[in-house]
Image: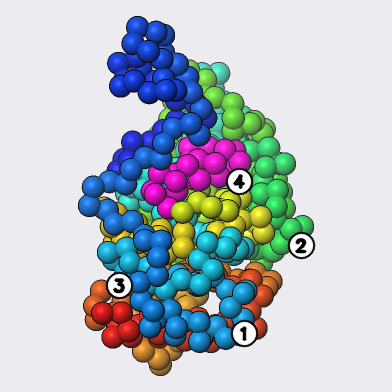
Amino acid sequence: MLRVALLVPLALGLVTVGVQAAPHPALPAPGEAQATIPLAALPTAPPPIGWPQLQQLVSCPALQHQVLASLGAEARVWSISVADPSGRLLADVNGLVPRIPASNQKLISTAYALDQLGPDHRLRSQLWRLGDGSFRLTGEGDPDLALPQLQRFAKLALGSGGSSGSPGTIVRLQIAEEPQQLWWPAGWQSDDRYTAYGAPITRLAVTSNAIHEAVLNPPNRLISLLQRSAAQQGGKVQVSLVSARQPLPGDALLLHEEPSASMHSLLSLANTESHNFTAEVLLRQAAGSWDLPEASQRAMVWLGEQGLPMQGVRVADGSGLDRANRLTSRLLAGLLLRMDHHPYSRNYLASMAVAGRRGTLRNLFRGSSLEGRFLGKTGTISGVRSISGVLLTGQGPRYVSAVSNGAYDPNSTIGAVLQAAQNTALCP
């Protein structure tokens, strides 16, 4: 797994400190045994040299005035931050007030995944042959897993692809899956879980566990499809469920692997089309854990390592469907600034929707000066509207985040804010 270590990462929870370190009040004196100290006791790591950090004070009064005028009497329900590539905070209204971000949460999941996994990473669905002659199917949540892949797995398990199988062959196949109580993030509302956008998050998810609505028992559907595929080839599979937390036996042999689409496609699916399932999988894979609380905590640590303002921030899931998420517009603007200076910045920017042209922004700001000039991520759940992204101007990009919890006509307000930020004459 490729990792871009621009900061020295600290292990979660506890850090072991060697005795050769310089004297520190919390560290052992030379000659003493190694000490284990809490992560919270360590100072925040400095940003990499040459990476601009978001400033804390507004430096463009003219734009600040325009933004406030656009908000009018609704300023209290908005958080808006605008920054430039040098880290200047050009405008900021309630920028440190934590709000429900809806799908702007995906900006974190996709940035984290790109940084930790790299642009060439693909999710893998794998068929293993075990020492006792049975098989095990494992997965990493490929959102595009579908019937053709299952047919290939069934064919290989039956021995039709060069093994010794014959018509009438019966094979034993395990499918490794997460326990049912972990299929949905705890904070997802019950009504959402029946919809396609609230489908359960599993490792082996045929068509992302959705048809017209959510597939409520993905393993049952998978078993049925595998048995049907085997029957079409004249064989039979006896399928059983095992925990995905159960390690593969030491004698397991990888028989076949089906890779997902490229990371570019996965990022675009999450950001351009706002696909919840993909964003959830990316968070888990980036963290190296399918335990959501642990994955969320690791994402929080990563955000802190980027030098971003973390006051009031909470990562509850990877998609933004959980209303327990809390982000600030200043964190989102800072994240966009950070990612624009990242080695994979082009991959990140290319995953965004485009105003008036592509994805969830294709019907917004069409025919205005923003069309084709704003690349961003939308977010919408009841009472919440957020749009954050990169605004292209004649004097370089502007990083804009606008999050409302309770605004009356948020799209019009955000359009006015973006057009004000587009006027570079306001901020010499």
> In front: mark 4 or mark 3?
3
Q: Quadrant of the N terminus?
A: top left
Evaluate whether residue 296 shows in this view.
Answer: yes
Please report the residue visible at 66 percent of the width from the left and 49 percent of the height from the top. 185
User: Mark 3: which amino acid?
Assistant: Pro
Inter-mark Cα distance, 4 to 1: 44 Å
Q: Is residue 231 above or below residue 366?
A: above
Inter-mark Cα distance, 1 to 3: 29 Å
Residue 202 got which mark?
4
Magenta range is: 285-308
Please report the residue visible at 37 percent of the width from the left and 13 percent of the height from the top. 29
| Dots 2, 3 in contact, CB < 8 A | no
Looking at the picture, tell me which residue is in the foreground, 387 or 319: 387
Please report the residue visible at 67 percent of the width from the left and 46 percent of the height from the top. 183
Q: What x and y, as percent, mark residue 330?
A: 46, 63
Residue 290 lies in the magenta-colored region: yes
Write down the residue under mark 3. 397
Q: What x and y, as percent, mark residue 164?
A: 46, 28
User: Mark 4: which amino acid?
Assistant: Thr
